Amino acid sequence: MSDVVTMDDLSNEEILSILDDSERLVPVAKGEVHLPLLEGKVLANMFYENSTRTRMSFETAMKRLGGSVLNFSSTGTSVAKGETLFDTMQMVDGYADIAVIRHPRQGAAQYSADAIGIPILNAGDGAGNHPTQTMLDLFTIREAHGTLEGLNVVLVGDLRYGRTVHSLSHALTRFGAKLTLVSPETLRMPDEIVTDLRSSGSEISETTELSDVIPEADVIYMTRIQKERFPDEDEYTKVAGIYMLNATDMDGSKDGMIVMHPLPRVGELHPSLDSTKNARYFQQAFNGVPTRMALLCRSLGVKIPKKVKK
Amino acid sequence: MSEMRRVTAICNGTVIDHIPAGHALQVIRMLRIDTNRSNPVSLVMNVPSDKMGRKDVLKIEDLELSQEELDRLALISPHASVAIIRNYGVAEKRVVELADELVNVASCTFSNCITQNPREPLPQKLRLVSREPLEVRCYYCGRGQDLNEIIENIL
């Protein structure tokens, strides 16, 4: 299947091969090389929820490869009139060659993949999965450390509702990473996921204290506490701003340790961190372009040349 | 066979034998025999069994279980023996097998699952993750549910 709904749709070999493809596509992503591999192809960007980086990087990825993009948002369209996801996707099946979907409801991407024939890439379904973010996260980690294996990755913040950490933690354990989960009690990683991660044989530890685990980390992956996922504002206020990193927190960290964040940030990362050698979040956001290029090509069955000439 | 004489033989219908002891009422709920049906049902609970120690038996008159209904039964009672009775004799033996995917058996319990919109037309699907202990998850959103939740949300 050419859909990517969860990381389970990709084997470890496929993940590594997509990361290799992404690496070769970096000059194309930067606009330094013209490589119209997807000329004549149309991508439908189906965003039922807000997005900045995911939507724009998919659009850039498609356009840099010579394809075109239909942008959809649920406001001002037939969705506002009560159209089902099934019906909307039937239309997309006729208009585009591939669709990217972000939806507030969990399972929406798998549902869309079952509803239509064109390939579906999941760009976030509720608090479920966000596998294309995971691919760019893995790319960023491999770029910094040269490997995915055996790293100590600290995931921080909203581990309950944060879909990026759900997909990423699954993928990392497949490559033998050690995970340290840092969150307030109320935002712990769901038990189902922790059970799955442990059953894969990985070393998983949970704590509420971030400062204790910084010295041992190879990667610190910060996340925003997502106000929009809280049923009530009081619960949000109790935990908002609980974890913050600034430049001085980097003292005593391992050489080569990187700080990542799927962005947007709302205070978890102080701007003083931006100029440190540890900060990788803006590079991480750029990495969305080459990895999404590679994913679009894979799903559309387009081979990426072994050498991309400048 | 002494336990079989606790209730009379039925002329036509279905006999479900080797239900784990104490689970016959769950089977009745799961097969929706307790609602929208007027078939006579005989229930025997906690009777001795060579195979299981104790077991439950159900005799449902004038109803032949379909494969789809058997799929439901397998969730509670994967080792049950089912016999279709016609004119007081065993006309057919049906195999109860727990399918890897349960289509339109029970709805997902998660309030934010895409299938919660009743107008969405694709079927409810549960995926079997493990047989023992029983673990079932929504095929779309991945939310797990236990047997009691399945019975509560039976379609």
Image: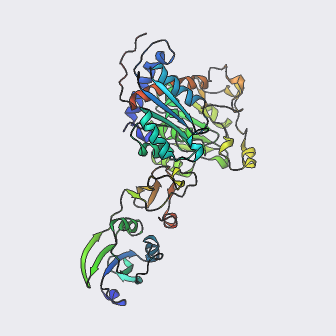
At a point 36% along the width and 81% down the height, the residue shown is B59
Q: Image quadrant of residue A218?
A: top right
Q: Position of residue A138 (x, y in %)?
A: 50, 30
At a point 57% along the width and 44% down the height, the residue shown is A127
Q: Position of residue A6 (x, y in %)?
A: 46, 41
Q: Position of residue A11 (x, y in %)?
A: 39, 37
Residue A256 seen from this side: no
Q: Position of residue B113 (x, y in %)?
A: 54, 51
Quadrant of image for the C terminus of chain A: top left
Q: Is residue B72 left or right of residue B120?
A: left
Q: Is residue A230 left or right of residue A79?
A: right
Q: Is residue A218 left or right of residue B78?
A: right
Compare residues A42 and A175 and report the one nearer the observer.
Answer: A42
Residue B83 vertical position relative to residue B146 in the rendered view, above or below:
below
Residue A42 vertical position relative to residue B55 in the rendered view, above or below:
above
Quadrant of image for the N terminus of chain A: top left
